[in-house]
Image (cartoon, rainbow, N blue to C red):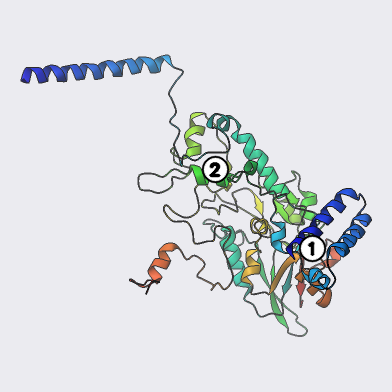
Amino acid sequence: MTSNINNEKQAEITSAETDSSRRNFVFGSIAAAGVTIAPGVMLYQTANARSLSDFSLKEGASSKVRWGMLVDTTKQVDWNKCVEACNKEHGLNNETHSRDDQKTQYIRVVDVKNKGTGHSMSLPVMCQHCESAPCVDVCPTGASMKRDDGIVLVDRHRCIGCRYCMMACPYKARSFVHEVLSDQKENTPRGKGCVESCNMCVNRIDNGLEPACVEASNEAIIFGDLNDPESKIAKLLKEFGGKQIRADLKLNPGVYYKGI
Amino acid sequence: MRLHLNLLSLAIVSLVLLTSMSSVVASQDSLGPKITIQQTSGEKCILPPEEMRRQHPDLLKHDRIATLREGVRAKADGGKLDGSLKQCVNCHAIKDDSNKYVRIDNDQHFCVSCHKYAAVSIDCFQCHRDIPEGGGDFHTLSNHKGINYNAVVPGTYNLTVQDMANIVPEGYSDDK
């Protein structure tokens, strides 16, 4: 079984190398799958989605992947659990001199109420990892960047702290560090004078783990590859749909919400 | 006998004096004060020390671009060491007399000891962690890959080894 998967992968890789056009690549890989997979095994093979560990990135982020999240707001989940996991993972909330509204938040829990119906709910809002991210467009130094797999993050080596991206972001997802920090987490360097935001736990993804908030959410947040039609998140989105916040801005965020 | 001892001590004292004088002369002849580089774990780095001394800024700069912007988390040159500042810190952390890691404000810190001597002031550690995670003899409770956030109870995220020792009743053992 595993050799079949390897063969299929190999076939995909070779077809990608030999065929220059995307069209050829798609048809080439389908043909290869038909050859290598025995009848009867086909169903299982196609249902078997690419897993996170397939992308333990030894060769770097790939644009074949688009990481995304689906937040199910209909589930009764204490979103603060996710916030706490996030704070723990990235060592946040350790400012001592900043006001509360200055402190870094990667995830904000937003309470909304429909005055007409009286229906209220809360949802976690983090960086929405837009496909055409305004923060990346406006950054004067190239510090605000989008990785090939769709994760938007700040390269603090280049950030000069101008906060232009904070103004550009329609989701208010970014924070600025106002004071000297110490005792950072070794996987999340952060310091005074830089803008920062949710990076989808890029260090965990590269190690084959899911983001901290996803793990803490008790399956209320689904994480996966939006480009892979066999992934759980893509299937759920296809079946039940999902809304992007401020979809009218046509930024194509990677974070979808169910039940808003 | 006593005379003999006196002579011997005199000889030793004069010898010590002579050597100390000669060392003073020698240090005046050399180019300046010598630096003491802190010795750490003793395992092999990715390059010999002479090359690391000259090339580590370029290596770090290369790897920071590869890791952050391109997502490459490969080991340095296929070896067992990460090509990251985290790996540098984990190997080269210095402990003080009380068995605690010295921080970046201490002259004994591996990076500081040389950078101060060479009058280099760079700001890696304004953002990066300056000592390994987990204190002294213990590592943090983790699988060395990442923390597992499944089934965590809010408010208990900061469990340390010490906390666990306090929670587990005295004399408890898995063996019984």
Q: Chain of mark 2?
A: B
Q: How many labels sit on residues? A: 2
Q: Chain of mark 1?
A: A
Residue A170 in sight in this render: no
Query: Horizontal and vertical percent for residue A27?
Result: 92, 60
Within 10 Å of the Cα at label 2, are there few (<14), some (14-19), or many (20+) other Cα atoms? Answer: many
Image disc number at residue A253: 1
Does the CB distance between marks 2 and 1 fall below 8 Å? Answer: no
In this rendering, position of residue B32 left or right of residue A101: left
Instruction: Quote the CA–CA distance across marks 2 and 1.
Output: 37 Å
Q: Where is B45 relative to A87, above or below?
A: above
Q: Residue at x 81, y 69 (%)?
A: A46
In this rendering, position of residue B137 left or right of residue B153: left
Q: Where is B34 relative to A31, above or below?
A: above
Residue B21 in sight in this render: yes
Q: Residue at x 6, y 20 (%)?
A: B2
Residue nearer the viewer, A246 or B59: B59
- The residue indicated by pointer 2 is B88
In this rendering, position of residue A231 left or right of residue A29: left
Q: Where is B41 relative to B136, above or below?
A: above
Q: Residue at x 85, y 71 (%)?
A: A39
Residue lying farthest to the bottom in this orientation: A117
Among the 4 quarters of the image, the one containing residue B171? bottom left
Q: Residue at x 63, y 46 (%)?
A: B75
